[in-house]
Amino acid sequence: MKHTVIDFVQMLETVNKDGRKHEYLIDDIQVYEDYLHYKREYVNHPYHKNLEYHLFPKENIGIYALTQYPNLNVEKAEIYKYYVDMVSVAKSTEKWIVKDLYLDFIIKCDEKHYVVDVDEFNDAIKSKEMTSEDISSALSGLDNVLKGYYRSFDINEFIHSLIERYANEQCRIFNNIRRLDYGT
């Protein structure tokens, strides 16, 4: 199972998956009581240049908005534009730990959308890797993203509706920018 630690103080995203650990510098981060947003470079990828992450713990979803390099000569159907993980989140004052719950919803650059990794979700249930709470959180997250997306078939509209709900000035608990030259 993949676990990601988002450390506000170090401005570091650490991904632990299959015994491997990857660390990525976060360029810009804002943390609210029930919403986290950051930007960083997408390291060593042939299509994706940057990513923007929106984490909504109460919705059980983390949404990656991916920015591609200009002038790519690749079929749009091959490139992810948005990747939504179903997650559960453990929060502390300096970091949030995000547990990936296998189910994913993706939108590709050709605007087609898919629910993926249902086989991995099913295998995790069979192997008892997931608790009943994990299973419920994953299904709740999938329900939330599908209902939100299907309202208008516009993922940005859905993201903005969640930001309005969870990100107000009274709830901001952390804000930091690593580099001022970050460009998307």
Image (spheres, grey):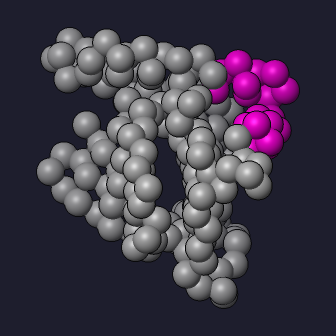
User: Which residue is at 48% across, 16% downward?
Assistant: 139
User: Which residue is at 44% across, 56% downward?
Assistant: 93
User: Which residue is at 76% across, 37% downward?
Assistant: 165
Percent across and percent down for residue 173 are 60, 58
Q: Is residue 109 magenta?
A: no
- Image height check: is 53 above or below 123? below
- Image height check: is 10 above or below 165? below
- Give 67 or 156, whichever is nearer the viewer: 156
Q: Quadrant of residue 99?
A: top left
Q: Quadrant of residue 160?
A: top right
- Give 106 or 102, whichever is nearer the viewer: 102
Placement of the N terminus among the 4 image quadrants: top left
- Image height check: is 156 above or below 115? below
Percent across and percent down for residue 16 are 26, 52
Q: Is residue 125 left or right of residue 53?
A: left
Placement of the C terminus among the 4 image quadrants: bottom right
Percent across and percent down for residue 91 are 42, 45
Q: Is residue 9 left or right of residue 145?
A: left
User: Which residue is at 42% across, 38% downward?
Assistant: 89
Which residues lie in the magenta part?
145-165
Instruction: Report the predominant secondary structure element of the magenta stretch.
Output: helix
Percent across and percent down for residue 128 are 18, 16
Say if residue 172 shows up in the picture. Answer: yes
